Image (spheres, helix red, strand yellow):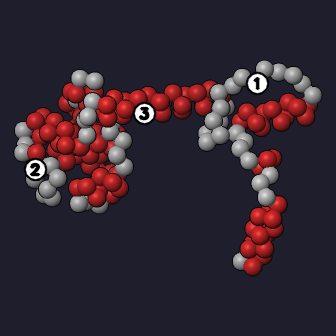
Amino acid sequence: RKHYAAFIADGVDQGKRPELVGGGLVRSLIGQVEQAGCAIDYRMASDERILGDGDFVESILKEAHEQLTDRQHYQTAGFGLEELTNLVAGLLDIDPSQIKVAGKQPEKVRARSLFCYWAVRELGFTATALAREMGISQPAVNLAVRRGEKLAAEQGWRLAELVNL
C-alpha cells in the first residue's frame, strides 16, 4: 500500500499528461498511421467509451440513440409511472392501487411483472429505483422484468403502440 501511495503521489506531481488523456479507436489508429508515415482518411465512427471497430461503434450508438429517442417520446408525452400503472391496470383488469401492493395472487404478479418490464425496458428506470418505488428488492424487480417481457410477447403488447407514440 505504501508503494502504491508513493506511485500515485509521483503521478500527481507530473500533472495532466495529454498522451494519457482521451483515447479510443481513432486515436490509436492515428498514432499507428503517423508512426508508419502514411496519409489516410481518418473518418471512422468512434466513441472513447466503446471498445471496438467503427462498424461496432456505429451499431451501438445507433441502438442507444433509438432507445433514448423512445424514452424521450414517453417523457415528452408526459407518460410516467402513474400513466403506466393505469395502462397496465386497464389491460389486466385490476385496480391500479394493487400493482404496487405486495402479494402472490396471480393477477397482482402479472400486473407487477408487466409494469416492471415496461418501466425498466421502455421508460428507462433502473431496477434499483423501481425497487425503492415499489417496496420490493432489486432482484425481485429483475425477475418481474423477465416475467413481464414474456407476458408482453405472449399477448403481442408493445408499449409504444398502446400509448400511440
The mark found on residue 78 in the picture is none
Question: Left or right: 163 with respect to 42?
Answer: left
Give the quarter of the image for residue 46: top right
Q: How far apart are marks 2 and 1 (CA)?
A: 57 Å
Q: Do the residues labelled 3 and 1 touch (CB within 8 Å)?
A: no
* Amino acid beneath label 3: Leu
Residue 127 visible in image: yes
**Mark 2 or mark 1: which comes first in sequence?**
1
Secondary structure at badge 1 equals loop
Q: Choose between 57 and 5: the one closer to the eye.
A: 5
Position in image of residue 83 (x %, y %): 19, 38
Check residue 42 in the rendering and tell me which mark sits there, or answer none: 1
On the image, numbered disc 3 is attached to which residue? 68
> Is 95 left, or right, of 38 in this rendering?
left
Crowding around mark 2 (Cα neighbors within 10 Å: few <14, some 14 to 19, many 20+) is few
Q: What element carries label 3?
A: helix
Density class for disc 3 (Cα within 10 Å; few <14, some 14-19, many ≥20) is: some
**In the figure, residue 164 lies in which quadrant?**
top left
Q: In this view, does 13 lie to the left or right of 88?
A: right
Residue under label 2, please give it: 97
63 shown above or below 103:
above
Which quarter shows the C terminus? Answer: top left
Task: Identify the amino acid type marked 1.
Answer: Tyr
Q: Which tag, 3 or 2, sits closer to the chain's start?
A: 3
Q: Nearer the viewer, residue 120 or 69?
A: 69
Disc 2 residue type?
Answer: Ser
Q: Residue drawn at (78%, 74%), measured in percent from left and top? A: 6
Q: Which of marks 3 and 1 is nearer the N terminus?
A: 1
How far, Cα to Cα, is label 3 from label 1?
28 Å
